[in-house]
Image (cartoon, rainbow, N blue to C red):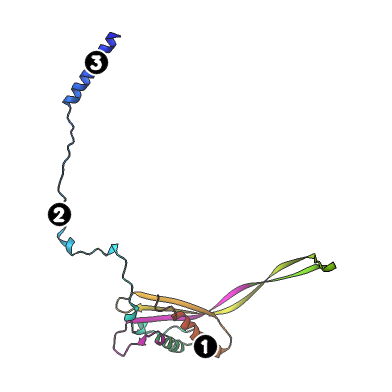
Amino acid sequence: MTLRILLLGTSLTLLAACQGQSQNPYSAQSLPMPPAPAAAAQTFDRSGYPAAARDYGRYHSWAWQAGQLPSGAGWADSAQIAEMLTDSLDQQGLRPAQQGAKPDLLVSGNVRMERRQVQDYDRSGAYYGNSPYGNTYGMGGSVPMRRTYEQNVLIVNLQLTEAASGQSIWSDSAESISVDDQAERSKLLRKTIQQALSSYPPN
């Protein structure tokens, strides 16, 4: 027992001596921050800020994109569509650019007719029973009846591009179920163009 205690004491003495002689190879150092680049004071980082809201009030004039009128749709030629679109743009405070003047906006659009298949459901049923003493007894049921038919849909697509930057600033579309009467269809076209432009300027 004495020998074990002696050996343990000797080991602890040697361990303490080794720790006293060893040195920590790492030392704390405090270095100054490197100076900022000379251009940092003149550089503004916009990535941390939201983009400024677009001022649509500064747009007043327009011209056709690439000088081309909106594409027609068979029963409505380009000139007729252009006239209706010009009137609708005027209601939004946008005027055609004067001859030789640079427009604020470039206008493009197209009108097309699309034939779609529509499904509708009717529910029909029957009731069986009698009503003795004013109480109703019986049973009933209904079965959905599916009807499939086709209809013509008038579709108007419009786009406004900033002339200075070439950036699209607004686009929208509208559609209406077409009619067979030519005069009524022209009224419907004008109404659909106005509906497409109703979202300009965006809120």
Q: How many marks?
A: 3
Examine the rendering and report whether any part of residue 156 can be seen. Answer: yes
Q: Which residues are magenta?
A: 90-119
Closer to the camera in the image, 88 or 149: 88
| Location of the C terminus (image quadrant) | bottom left
Estimate the spatial distance between the alpha carbons at disc 2 and disc 1, rounded to whole Å: 70 Å
The reply to whether residue 131 is in sight is no
For this view, does 30 lie left or right of residue 75? left
Q: Residue at x 35, y 85 (%)?
A: 63
Q: Identify the amino acid type marked 3.
A: Gly
Inspect the image, locate mark 1, and give the three-letter code of the amino acid beneath it: Lys
Q: Any magenta on residue 84? A: no
Residue at image location 77% in from the left, 69% down from the top:
126
Of 136 and 86, which appears nearest the observer? 136
| Disc sitting over residue 9 in the figure | 3
Residue type at numbered disc 2 = Pro
Residue occupying the point 58% across, 86% down: 180
Side of 133 where 75 appears, left or right: left
Residue 64's quadrant in the figure? Answer: bottom left
Dot 2 crowding, Cα within 10 Å, few <14, some 14–19, many 20+ = few
Residue identifier under label 1: 187
Determine whether label 3 and label 2 are within 8 Å by CB. no
- What is the spatial separation of the Cα atoms under label 3 and label 2, in whole angstroms? 56 Å
Q: Residues within 10 Å of mark 3 (few under 14, many from 20)?
A: few
- Label 2 sits on residue: 35
Q: Earlier in the sequence, mark 1 or mark 3?
A: 3
When the figure is inspected, residue 143 is found, relative to residue 111, above or below; the finding is: above
**Nearer the camera: disc 3 or disc 2:** 3
Residue 149 picture location, percent across and down? 63, 76
Rendered location of residue 104, percent (x, y)? 32, 82
Q: Earlier in the sequence, mark 3 or mark 2?
A: 3
- From the image, which quarter does the N terminus lie in? top left
